[in-house]
Image (cartoon, rainbow, N blue to C red):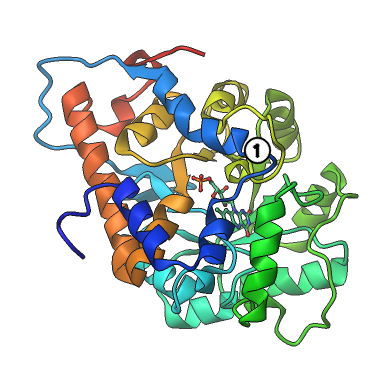
Amino acid sequence: MDDHVKSISDLRKIAKQKLNADAYQYLESGADDDLTKEINESDFQKIKIRARRLVDVRHIDLSTKFLGKEFPLPFFMAPVGFQKVFHEEGEIASAQAAAERSIPFALSTVSNYSIGDLASQTKAELWFQLYPTSNPELAKKLILKAEKAQAKVLILTADVPVLGNRKTHRKSLENLQLFGDLSLGNFAGEEEGHTIHNPGITWEYVKWLRANTSMKIFIKGIVTKEDAAFCLQHNVDGIIVSNHGGRQLESLRSTIASLSEVCKEIDKAIPVLMDGGIRRGTDIFKALALGADGVCLGRAFIYGLASNGKAGVLKSIDILKEELIRCMQLAGVASLKDLNASNIEVEF
Ligand SMILES: Cc1cc2nc3c(=O)[nH]c(=O)nc-3n(C[C@H](O)[C@H](O)[C@H](O)COP(=O)(O)O)c2cc1C
């Protein structure tokens, strides 16, 4: 990939040039007027870094321990549906890149390739994201497929009881469907017409999941301390603070503004990840300083996938890694273990 590609924003420009208008619209769209999607990115500017001086920063340690395992980088791949819309190799290319950098890859329920395809064609550590279909038999089948593929974590996405108001997104998906891009790998052999949304689910569903899987259970979409407390009560194994990239409820706070109260409530009892608006190494630094154990990349890696398949995803990971290293060197923090709230000043 060209040397002049130096930032996630450069990859975004290439993605825009390469993708057809409907695919780009599907990627970029938020709910209503895109306000939450936009503040997910811009609220990072409300956090300033407090740099320390005269610290030995020759060696920067980005490793992070998570669920008893050490990972070389503090970021993971968020579930993003229909990745063939962005590149013909879709989720396979993204997961291969994740494997090459030893970072886990979360596969969406609505992926083009199935979880079995990913297990047989990549070496990635797989996590499986579940949309709680109202058909428990179907949910069980999806869980079994994920277990067979040795997925380590089951992510329950809790912020989609109904689909957000994404008018342009719906139109663009309808248009994309006309070209046959939207096969659902995990539903192969299943009857058509199942909905993936379930407005009836409650915390009882988490108990049901516990009884039906041995995978670790993460809940994605938590944005309040009250729900963080419920996660602890229900013995959830991890949380992803997320507002679905601003695609669900409009007028939510940004995820970076929601993170602190969740981390305080959890108080290190279980891992807390966050996603939403991560575009720079400094964004990752700020999220970890606020207490996150790691972040998930969403659009950031998809811009890479759209611009150049697996090489593009690798580029997006490497850009963020280099930016994070430089940020830590300039801020005088040699290891993520030393990063904490004293390294930032928050203005919201
Ligand atoms: C095109 C697209 C598709 C997505 N598909 C899913 C999905 O299938 N399941 C899910 O839990 N989240 C999905 N998300 C949300 C992401 O997992 C993540 O929360 C979000 O992208 C983070 O925001 P950011 O991309 O602005 O950083 C999707 C996001 C985008 C942009």
* 34 lies above or below 27: above
Report crowding for label 1: few under 14, some 14 to 19, many 20 or more residues within 10 A (C-alpha): some
Specify the farthest residue to the right: 200
Q: Residue at x 47, y 52 (%)?
A: 299
**Residue 66 placement (x, y as % from top left):** 45, 45
Q: Residue at x 53, y 51 (%)?
A: 28
Q: Residue at x 22, y 23 (%)?
A: 331
Q: Which is nearer the eye, 4 or 267?
A: 4
Q: Which is nearer the eye, 291 or 3?
A: 3
Specify the farthest residue to the bottom: 189
**Residue 191 placement (x, y as % from top left):** 83, 83
Q: Quadrant of residue 248?
A: top right
* 110 lies above or below 72: below
In this rendering, does residue 34 appear at all?
Answer: yes
Q: Quadrant of residue 130?
A: bottom right
SS type, badge 1: loop
* Quadrant holding the N terminus: bottom left
In this rendering, does residue 109 appear at all?
Answer: no
**Residue 65 placement (x, y as % from top left):** 39, 43
Q: Residue at x 48, y 25 (%)?
A: 43
* 306 lies above or below 54: below
For badge 1, the amino acid type reads Asp
Q: Quadrant of residue 99?
A: bottom left
Q: To which residue does mark 1 refer?
A: 33
**Residue 309 placement (x, y as % from top left):** 36, 71
